[in-house]
Amino acid sequence: MVWIGRALSVAALAVVAWACLTSWGAVVHGSPAYAAMLVVTVVLAVVSLVRLGRPPRERSAARLVGGAVSIVLWALWIVAVWWLRPFSAVEPAIAAMQSDARVTVTESWTDVTLAPTEGGDGTAVLFQPGAKVEARAYAAVLRPLAEAGHTVVIVKQPLGIAFFSLGALSSAQSAHPDISRWIVGGHSLGGTVAAIEADDNDSGSGGDVAGLLLYASYPASDMSTTLTADVLSIYASNDGLATPADIDASKADLPASAQFVEIDGAVHSYFGDYGPQPGDGTPTISQQDARQQISFQSVGFVGRLATPAG
């Protein structure tokens, strides 16, 4: 059992090193939760190695059982650290994080904000990233919204899981009291959580959410009769994760007025800039082409909602 504990502790240090080497940008620029998890892992591994390096003591049956349980829990923790390693943003998302005369980019521990430099139009988009994808990865595809006059807030989810950011809309509203109209959106799992936020804060029920923008995503439950916000679902024809069949099935869970736009030849990972994703399909168009189409559709959708009817 001592050797198993030592092997696991060494493996834990190796996983931390691997996560830092392969996803350093996401570790530094993401929510502090995963970075804290890495620090805790290092501390636990070092303490474990020190304790296991001492001369063994005679152990009772209770100690043996406790040791076995500790080893199982330690192994599960290491697997969690490995699985939660985030997808780091790559170009052109990194370049899109730079402020210029049109867009001011600010970054905090909780979000990335792209704001029109000369002041927005009172409409904002709150965007939830896909699972384990860092917030900066969506800067390039969403920046055209800010250039069109709309504030964009991209959530930094704890551990990269959107369900841990269900209160993000309320936080964003408090941080931006000048915004009177919100569109919530998200990619993949982030879109599922955005749909929950939209349904709970629908402008038709007295809330501030006027629209739901889905990127390769769909709601987890039927909101076809409860959601009054406008909906745009953009999906990819070659998506291996949120497949066209999944999107087609989701139509029954969304209002009949929901709009669906297919990006022909695109895949799941083309909705952000974070590299290939396991299980995804094979693209037949360039990511730049897909990104331009996604941005164009998004700007048109938000622009229509930003203009008061009548």
Image (cartoon, rainbow, N blue to C red):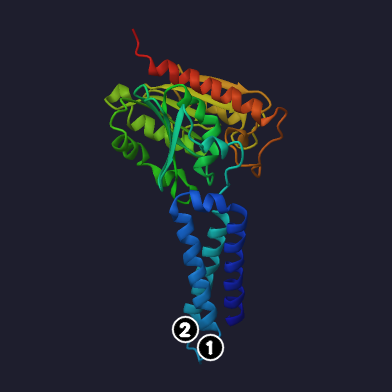
Q: Residue at x 60, y 63 (%)?
A: 17
Whichever of labels 2 and 1 marks the residue nearer the N terminus, that label is 1
Q: Is residue 218 visible?
A: yes
Helix, strand or loop at label 1? It is loop
**Hey, what amino acid is under mark 2?**
Arg
* Position of the N terminus by quadrant: bottom right
Vertical arrangement, residue 35 with respect to residue 275, above or below:
below
Could you tell me how far apart the alpha carbons at marks 2 and 1 are, in whole angstroms? 16 Å
Would you call the spot at circle 2 few (<14 residues within 10 Å), some (14-19), or many (20 or more)?
A: few
Q: Residue at x 60, y 28 (%)?
A: 291
**x and y percentages locating residue 56 in the rendered image:** 54, 90
Would you call the spot at circle 1 few (<14 residues within 10 Å), some (14-19), or many (20 or more)?
A: few
Q: Quadrant of residue 248?
A: top right
**x and y percentages locating residue 264 in the rendered image:** 66, 23
Image marks 2 and 1: residues in contact by CB distance under 8 Å? no
Depth order, front residue of 1/284: 284
**Hey, what amino acid is under mark 1?**
Arg
**x and y percentages locating residue 77 in the rendered image:** 51, 64
Q: Which mark is residue 54?
A: 1
Q: Which mark is residue 305?
A: none
Q: Which mark is residue 63?
A: 2
Q: Is residue 68 visible?
A: no
| Of marks 2 and 1, the one in the foreground | 1
**x and y percentages locating residue 7 in the rendered image:** 62, 74
Tell whether 70 sits left or right of 246: left
Vertical arrangement, residue 158 with respect to residue 228, above or below:
below
Residue ranking furthest to the front: 101
* Position of the C terminus by quadrant: top left
Tell whether 270 sits left or right of 256: right
